[in-house]
């Protein structure tokens, strides 16, 4: 009885790919299979869409709209953002720009999502560079990064934390709400790490889940099921301490009273971690 040779997969490289106007075909490594003394080759090909010229032009136009909107934001604040003003600067008709953003609110929502997302990305990266075994260092890293980001992007800070934009109605959900949820999780996560030492230091006053917004409570209890309502209260107070001096500095109220805002903020962060028992 002749033994049956097993299937032996052998990977080899393929030297080229094929492209068309709208589709790039990526060729995966060939699989050579030996079976019953015969050699067969199977090449897997998958298609990756390539944006059309129209899609590329649209993406470029959207990026230009956002860039001008951010400049208008920096120059005149959120109320300076106008689709008609952007259209004039780009040499577009007012009607044409509405093909990209149906309303000014749509554009502002996009900007808020991008600005807020950048802030949270920056704060999370700074926190994660500090070992998890150093909760005090993580609190300080988050706070000082928020201050540094705000000083580098004062218009962005005012957009997400300043006065409401006149006439703006934020939509429920979406990327802006997602970024806000990440910021909330980041702050509550800092409290969770400090809770073993912070819990005994909290006041004995009554705090209940009903004291807070229902959506916020749902988010926190899903993400941090072991934390009590006192921990959420602490998170909000910590947020206030981190952002309070930053807001005073951004809006020009801290100088000339303080000649060294960075030193003052550092002292506030050190006092904050001491209040957490860290």
Image (cartoon, helix red, strand yellow):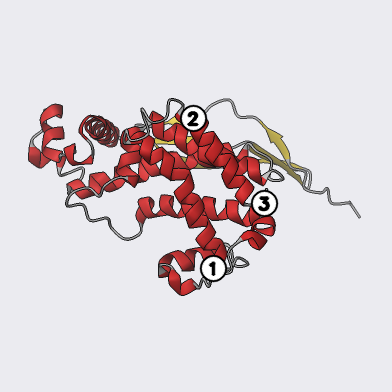
Q: Name the residue beneath numbered marker 3.
A: 277
Q: Position of residue 45 (x, y in %)?
A: 53, 41
Mark 2 or 1: the one toward you: 2
Q: Name the residue beneath numbered marker 2.
A: 262
Q: Name the element at disc 1.
A: helix
Would you identify the image quadrant in which residue 247 lies?
Answer: top left
Residue found farthest to the right: 1
Q: Name the residue beneath numbered marker 1.
A: 229
Query: Is residue 160 visible to us here?
Result: yes
Asked whether 202 or 7 is in front, the reply is 202
Mark 1 or 3: the one toward you: 3
Would you identify the image quadrant in which residue 10 lies?
Answer: top right
Category of crowding for the residue at label 3, using alpha-carbon neighbours closer than 10 angstroms: few (below 14), some (14–19), many (at least 20)? some
Q: Is residue 170 left or right of residue 35?
A: left
Is tag 1's residue or tag 3's residue first in the polypeptide sequence? Answer: 1
Is tag 2's residue or tag 3's residue first in the polypeptide sequence? Answer: 2
Asked whether 98 or 23 is in front, the reply is 98
Q: Is residue 132 left or right of residue 258?
A: right
Q: Is residue 234 above or below residue 59?
A: below
Category of crowding for the residue at label 1, using alpha-carbon neighbours closer than 10 angstroms: few (below 14), some (14–19), many (at least 20)? some
Query: Is residue 27 visible to us here?
Result: no
Q: Is residue 210 above or below residue 129?
A: below
Question: Which residue is at a point 48% across and 47% down the rendered structure image?
Answer: 241
Asked whether 266 or 77 is in front, the reply is 266
């Amino acid at each position: 009885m002749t033994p049956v040779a097993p299937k032996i997969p052998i990977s080899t490289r393929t030297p080229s790919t094929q492209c068309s106007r709208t589709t790039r075909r990526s060729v995966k490594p060939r699989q050579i299979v030996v079976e019953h003394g015969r050699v067969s080759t199977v090449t897997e090909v998958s298609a990756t869409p390539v944006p059309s010229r129209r899609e590329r032009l649209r993406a470029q136009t959207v990026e230009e709209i956002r860039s001008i909107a951010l400049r208008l934001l920096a120059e005149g604040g959120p109320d300076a953002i106008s689709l008609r003003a952007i259209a004039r600067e780009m040499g577009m008709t007012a009607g044409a720009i509405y093909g990209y953003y149906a309303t000014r609110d749509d554009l502002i929502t996009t900007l808020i999502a991008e600005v807020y997302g950048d802030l949270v990305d920056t704060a999370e990266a700074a926190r994660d560079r500090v070992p998890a075994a150093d909760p005090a260092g993580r609190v300080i890293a988050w706070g000082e990064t928020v201050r540094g980001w705000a000083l580098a992007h004062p218009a962005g800070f005012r957009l997400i934390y300043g006065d409401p934009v006149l006439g703006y109605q934020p939509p429920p959900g979406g990327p802006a709400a997602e970024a806000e949820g990440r910021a909330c999780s980041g702050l509550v996560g800092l409290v969770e790490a400090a809770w073993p030492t912070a819990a005994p230091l909290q006041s004995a006053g009554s705090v209940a889940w009903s004291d807070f917004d229902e959506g916020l409570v749902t988010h926190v209890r899903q993400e941090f099921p072991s934390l009590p309502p006192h921990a959420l209260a602490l998170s909000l107070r910590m947020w206030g301490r981190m952002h309070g001096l930053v807001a005073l500095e951004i809006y020009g109220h801290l100088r000339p009273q303080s000649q060294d805002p960075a030193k003052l903020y550092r002292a506030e962060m050190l006092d904050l971690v001491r209040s957490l028992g860290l």
